[in-house]
Structures are given as structure tokens and as C-alpha cells.
Image (spheres, rainbow, N blue to C red):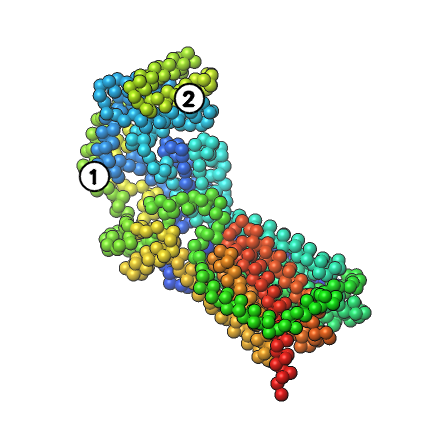
Amino acid sequence: MIQRSAWMWVLLAFALSAAAGWYTVNNIGINTDTTDMISADLDWRGDFIEFREAFPILWRSLVVVIDGDSADLAEKAQRTLLLEIASREDLFALSDGESSEDYFARQGLLYQDTQQLQQLGDRLAQIQPFLGRLSRDPTLRGFAELFTLLNRAADQGSDLDAQPLMRELTSALDAASERRFHRFPWLELMDADGEVEASERRRVILLEPRLDSALVAPARPAIEFIYTLTKDLELDPDHGVEVRLTGPVALEYEELRSVSQGAAVAGMLALGMVLAVLLWGLRSATLVLASLITLLLGLVLTAAFAAFSVGRLNLISIAFAVLYIGLGIDFSVHYCLRYRELLREGVDGAQALRTASSDVGASLILCAVTTSIGFFAFYPTAFTGVSELGLISGTGMYISLLANLIVLPALLHVLPTPRPTADQPLGSSSGRAARGAWPQRHPRLVVSLAVALGAGAVAMLMLVRFDPNPLNLRDPDSPSVTAYRDLLGEPQTSPLILSVLASDLQAAQAVAERSDGLPLVQSARTRRNFVPSEQEERLALIEELGFIIGPDLTVADPQDLDQAQRLNALMTLGNALEELASDGDPGATQALAALERYRRGDPSGPALDTLERSLIEGFAPQLRRLTTALTASPVTLDSLPTTLSVRWRAVDGRERVELRPVENLADNAAMARFVDQVRGEHPRATGLPVVQLGAGAAVVQAFVQAIVTALILVSVLLLLLLRSPLATFQVMAPVLLASVFTAAATVLLGVDFNFANIIALPLLLGMGVDNGIHLVHRYRSAPPGDGNLLATSTARAVIFSALTTIVSFGNLATSAHPGTASMGLVLAVGLGLILLCTLLVLPAVLSLGSTTDEATP
């Protein structure tokens, strides 16, 4: 029937594929949220979803991490970015009123304890004359005169530690000599003794971007705006600042790019390598063309089914295309090789197509069923990520089956009949025949070696590990991941915390008080923690600071110095440094040497202007910052800025309690201890640690459920179809052995199982059975005359179909996305081991089974 209406079937297939392609392009999307890859029906997932909806800014946030060469540069970059971002209400959902950054600029001193305020007062008392001098003349001349004042202070016995100032002056002069960007860190020098932690040179901005659901990457406009902004504002390492984006939105955006690009490249490479293997194996342009057309038509139809059934692919199901290419082509290889074998035997084209369909049709149907079982076994599990992949790819196997039983014969009928060519299979010469028949001539030896190696592999299974950390599935070199890991390294910025929802603030305070007694909880905070205690005492100290600074300390407009005045200023600076160095000041000695290096560089007017900007530019903003901080006023819950309150109080009035751990939760065992202890006290506590551990447990359970399901269904199916326990065992034994070898190989390769590659073993079980089905079917229905099963076209088809699948899956291993790469690696290694076990162990098992049958009376 297909041959009589071949053109109709071909045209119908092309029309259907065109419609499917249009539908796919207009309806498919990608969901990059890894938390959505676990079923929402699990209790902990329900708690997390409720919490995420109550505080969307915490879970749909864009975190801007600013690292500066100094705290001054980081703060300036923060202010500049916030000012520009505030003008783009179309991209960011900014709250009305005073921002939290402006709030802390004014009220920040209230959050320091009394000892810190007293130390700041002592320091300001020491440096006030210097601040006053430079504020009256904010030029290179005024800066040089600071060191004249230092000489006088030293002569008067002042205990002012000038070493931080000397170190920064040395750095500024060296940067000017080398024509490098530099800004003097006035903020650090005013606030402390010059010794600052790296964390003090970091600023973090939490933004809520407006997501455009019409785009594949909804956050792209907001993210690209910030990238463009940082470039236009020269906020880059060459100007002393590094700006990185992280948080859920940025992580998902970069992962989407990584996965999409990786999948596209892997798909193209897979097609190219499959084409090369087909040319080598089929040796016919007609067969290769028909196979590729059939493959692409089936792929488009499968993509349309994905758009219809799930709508939005996840970071695992997006790999369905490469999986389809690797598996879908297998059906074509078996069909075409049998068709070509018949042509070589002298059968005419039409009859060869009918016979090929009859000979391999049944085994192709059985292979489609067994392979789909490996995919469908994940569908009932709570692991939505591979559940969707299982649904798409499992259905894709039947789409591929129909395409190869209908479209492929129709194409081969309308295309020119291939010219019969001679094969050189494994048994085409006596030497090769002897080698090919070796497993059948020494079955006991082969089986004994297989059992021994299998026992060793089983012993290694205790070393197999599962990594539940989704961060390890992302590109480790992407800016969002590096910034996220930096935040993890700081206790006060780590996102690995737990939160508890309370009905109101009073209930939240009760939760915090109970949590403070838990040994593994470092701190328990609520919104009330942002109302400082002992405000009267602290406000009094701040008022004293104001008296120390003086009410009239403002920066005058700088004068424009000519070159002669600037050179005189350098001479004044040099004289002051010489005098300080002669008194044994080591910092002055180093600064003087740096000044001499700068002078030897023949500084011209522009070079002097650059030096002056480096030394003076940041002074006025930081003095204004200091005077602003001296205007602090009493703080109440109602006076907290909205941008701060929304992180702690939900729209419906519920309050959040934040629990930070004592231990570093980068260690999975520490994370488990923290979660167990907190949820023992607060069963509905949620957060990333709960999600990470819960997802890991759900995935492991899904894996066990899937592999047991696949094993039972495949075994029962084989038993029903083959009607022989022995034949069923013969097919299953090499697959089970290869599965154990694959698990052991992950230990040797140092590859942990994770959310992406854990699907490998159930899939390998379903796919690996196919090879055994083909060989056992050939052995039982049309055994080779010389007994060498590996010399048949069936064995050749097994080899080349396995190679096409291996090279297809292997391309995933080249992806920049570690999760996708690990999936490709495990699948490729597993398929290679299945091929070896099929070609070596299965013939030996069949030979032993045949001997047993002959010996049975």
C-alpha cells in the first residue's frame, strides 16, 4: 500500500512537518527555574511555593554585585547605578519613597554599637584639622599641605597613625607613573584605620525586574540594560570596579543561554557526525538522504508534540532533540542495511522494501516499546524535569517508528534504487571470522571474565555519589555563578538560609526567640531587628561627632591650578615626605620613592591633572556622606523604607523570620544538620537548603522508581514476546552488566550523579535492550550458516546504530553547561559499554544457551 501511494505519503509527511514546525516555533518556550523541575505536590515544595509567592522580590530578584578596588569606588558605582535604574520604571519595579541605600546613608551610624561610635569619634577628632584644610582647598596644593600638617602634628607628639595614608599615597603615585586608573580611598581612611576587609569593598543591590513573558528570556531587557549601562559608565576593572549580576533571574538567564547554545551546537554536531557514520555504514547517497529526511521529519513532529504536551521545556527536557537524533536514526540504520542486503542478494527494489519491512518491522516495534519504557519510567515520578523529558522522548520513539515504517519506505521507493555494494563485515575474511566468532568459541571464558569484572564493578557501587547542588550544573565560569559563589563565602550575604513565615510581627518575634536557642542557628532576625536599640545613647554620640566635625565643614569649589602651581604642590609634598622620612617614618620613605618615580616619568599638564583627580575626586562625596550620616534621627518600624520592609513583611501582613546557620552550608552534611534541626522546631521552614536537599531526595527516589519500573516492564515484555525465560535472560544479561559497569565508570571518571545525568541508567536499560533484541531475533529466526552471529548484517546494523547514538550523545559532553555535559558523557560511556557487552557477552551467552539446549534430553 505504501509503495502504491508513495508520493502521497511523502507529500503528506512534508506538509504535516511544515505545519508542526510552524506550531512549534509559535508555542514552545523554556523554563529555566530548576526548582520547578520537582513536583509541586511534595510538602516542602508547597511550603516553598507559598513563601516564594509571599516574597517575590527574594525569588524573582536580580542581584547586582559591585566589587571595587576601594570602598569609595564600590559606593560611587552603587549610587550611579541606582540613579540610572530609578529612571527605568519600565524595566524595574522600584518602590516609592526613600530607597534603603539612602536610608542607610543617613541612619547608618545608628546601627553601629556604642564602642564603634566612640572609636569613630576618636579618629575624627584626630583627622578633623586635615579634613578642614582640604575642604577649604580641594586641590593638589591642599592635598600636599596635609603632609605639612602631619609634620607639625608629629612634632607636637600626636599619636595619629599615618601609615594607611602613606600606603594609599604610594599606590596613587605608582598608578599615576604607570598611567593606571586610581582613586584615593577617602571613605576607608575616614571610617577606619585603613585596614578594611574585602567585604567592605563590595556593595550589593537587590532589584525586582519586570519580566516580559512574551520573550523566551523574560529578564533579557533588564539584564541587557544593566550590562549596557555598566559599559557606558565605564564601570569595569580598568576603572577599578567589577559589576556582576547574579540571583535567580541572572542565573536562569545565563543558564538559558548556556543550555540553548550548547543544545544548538550539540544538535548540529550530532547531525554532522551521524551523517559521517551513515556515509561510512550505509555507503549509499540514497539511503543516507532518505534516512536523514526521515530523521528530520520525525524530529520536527516530536518538537511539536513537546510544544503541545508541556509547552515550556526545562533544562533537562531541552536535550530531547539530541536524544532523538541519536535514537531515531537507529531504526533507519537497521531498515536500510537489511534493504541493502536484500538488494545485494539480487532481490528487486519493490520486493526488497516489502521484505525489509517484514524482517525488521517486528524488532523495530519491540525496540520502540523497550526504549520508550526507559523514558516513560520517569513519567510517574516527582522529578518533573525528566518526567517531561520521558514523555517527549518516549512519544518520540513511536513517532520515529511510524516515520521509519511509512515515510522511509515511501522515500526509498521514489528515490533512485541504490546500487548493491559489497560489505566487509566482521566476518568477511577467515581471520576476521575467527576473531568475530571468538566469543562463541570460548563462551565459558568470556562469561567467567564478565562475571568477575561485574563483581568488581558491583563492589565499586558503594563509592557512587549523588550531588544535589544545582549550582554545580551551571557553567562555573559564568559571571552569575562566580558572583553567587562569592556571596556564599560571606556569612552575611550567603543565600543558603532558612525562613519561617509568621502571622504577624509578634508571632515572628516568638519564632526568632525560640530559634536563637538552637545550636546550629547563628542568628534569627525579623523586621524589628532594623529598629536599633539604645537609640538615645547612640544619637547622643552621633551629635558629639557632629561637634567634632564642626557645623561649617563643607567643601569649597576647587580652584583651577596651572602647571607651575601643581609642580610647586609636588615640591611641597616632597619636602614634607623628606622630613617625615628623616624622622624614621617607613611609610613616608616608600611614598617619597614613589614620588621620585613619578617625577622621572616627566609629568606634563595632563599627567598632573590625572594625579590630582586620583587624589582629590573622591574627597567631596565622602565628606558629604559623613555629614549626611551625622543627621541621623530616631528610627521606628513605620519609618523603615519600603524597599527594606518588602523583604520582611508580605502584602497580606505575614512576617518573615530569617535564620542564618553557624556552619558553612557549602558542605552537604552541614546543610542536612541545619535543616533537620530547624525543621524539627519549625516544620514549615523553607529556603534554598530545604529545596536543595528535598530535590536531591526526590530525584534519588525517582531514579530508583524509574529503574525498577523499567527493569520490570522490559523483562515482562521480553518474556511475553520471546516466550522464553532463557531468551529473556540472554537479552537482559549484557544490559544489566553494562549498567553496572557504567555506574562504576562514574567513580573512575570522578563524575557524580546529578539532576541531569541520573536519567542515564534507566534510559540505557531501555535502549540497551534493543541491541540484544536484534541479535537474539536474528539468532533464533535466521541463524547464520557458519554460526558467526557477528558476521551478519544484523551485527553490522547494531554496531553502526550504536555508533550513531554514541556520537550523537557524545556531543552533549562538549557543552559548556556542566549538567548537559555530564549527561552526554554518562550516556556515551554507557552506550559504548552496552555495545561491548552485546558484541562480546551476548554471543557467548547464546552459545552457552545453545549448548544447554542440545544437552537437554
As rendered, which of 240 and 686 lies closer to the eye?
240
Placement of the C terminus among the 4 image quadrants: bottom right
Indicate the amino acid at tag 2.
Answer: Leu
Q: Quadrant of residue 360?
A: bottom right
Residue at the image point whose x is 40% and y is 60% from the top: 694
Q: Is residue 9 left or right of residue 460?
A: right
The foreground one among 560 and 15 is 560
Q: State the image coordinates of residue 833 (x, y, percent, origin top left).
A: 58, 63
30 left or right of 289 in image: left
Query: Which image quadrant: the N terminus?
Result: bottom right
Residue at the spot of label 2: 611
Q: Secondary structure at mark 2?
A: helix
Residue 535's disc is 1
Residue at the spot x=46%, y=34% of the render? 236
**Quick one: label 1, few (<14), some, or many (20+) residues within 10 Å?**
some
SS at circle 1: helix
Q: Is residue 289 above or below residue 98?
A: below
